[in-house]
Amino acid sequence: MEYLETALSELLDSLEAANSESEFYAAAERLARRSGFRWFAYFANAGANRKALSSYPRSWVRRYLDKSYEHLDPVIAKAQSTHKYFLWDSRATSVNAKAQRRFFDEAAEFGIRWGITLPIRSGQGRFAALTLAAESADAFSALSEIGSIELLQIAALYYHAHAHAKLQFGRVRTVDKLLTEREGQCLWWSAQGKTTYEIATILGISKRTVVFHLENARSKLQVSNITQAVAQALLRRLIGP
């Protein structure tokens, strides 16, 4: 279960820094991978405002939207009616309705066969759910460890709380600069020759958080390593004294 505790810690660090939809996407995708799953799907319904993020194959997402499967999806339906997490299987014999059976069969064509869904209820008909999905049941093996489900439930609650506050269900908060303030600070101190440990000490954050900000900056600048990220940031005057 130690790796799940690490995954949760990394998620919390990511959520503290996340301000855009792409950063929330990256945080959830990292959680899914670190937890042994291949995909994630987050859905929140707050009346007229809705938010959906997913790393499912694009061809499946297109089909899902084209056919308005949100009205048929058995996973969403169950998430709306329960407070408790649940495991699902595309071969589930309890799915009797032909349309729902067809839905699961189609999802399985794209490899989506197993998953765990963690509902989050907040009253007044509002709800959200975080789903982690995989191609095989192997992803479920770690969930048998005591406390593992509780860690994923905590992860889902924190994810929704940050998404609700920062993304506001469709009104994505924009960032004027390419880099966040923290990303710029980490790159600047890296440019001064400081190690990740030294940067963490200077900024009063964890070493893991420094690595997270540096990797985000590297990704945004579309370079392959931190040295190149520093060079690009200096060249483009994104950081400086």
Image (cartoon, rainbow, N blue to C red):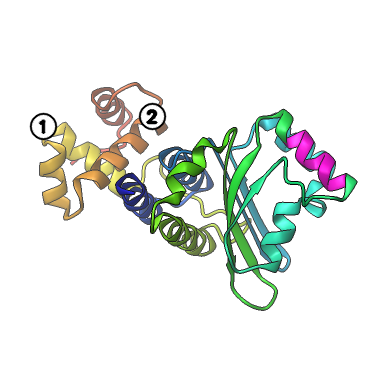
Question: Which residue is painted at 47% across and 42% down in the image?
Answer: 141
- Local SS, label 2: loop
Give the magenta-colored segment's residue range: 99-107
Question: Which residue is painted at 82% across and 43% down in the image?
Answer: 101
Does residue 41 appear to the left or right of 153 in the view shown?
A: right
Residue type of the residue flagged with mark 1: Gly
Q: CA distance from mark 2 to mark 1?
A: 19 Å
In this figure, which residue is indicated by the disc labeled 2? 221
Q: Main secondary structure of the magenta part?
A: helix
Mark drawn on residue 106: none
Report x, y in % for residue 233: 30, 31
**In the image shown, does 108 or 67 lie closer to the viewer?**
108
Furthest-bottom residue in this view: 124
In this figure, which residue is indicated by the disc labeled 1? 193
Does residue 205 appear to the left or right of 58 in the view shown?
A: left
Does residue 27 appear to the left or right of 65 in the view shown?
A: left
**Residue 84 is drawn in which quadrant?**
bottom right
Q: Considering only vertical position in the picture, is 93 above or below 225?
A: below
| Quadrant where the C terminus is found in the figure | top left
Q: Residue 110: within the magenta?
A: no
Q: Considering only vertical position in the picture, is 38 above or below 89?
A: above
Does residue 152 appear to the left or right of 91 in the view shown?
A: left
| Residue 176 visible in this rendered orientation of the protein | no
- Local SS, label 1: loop
Residue type of the residue flagged with mark 2: Leu
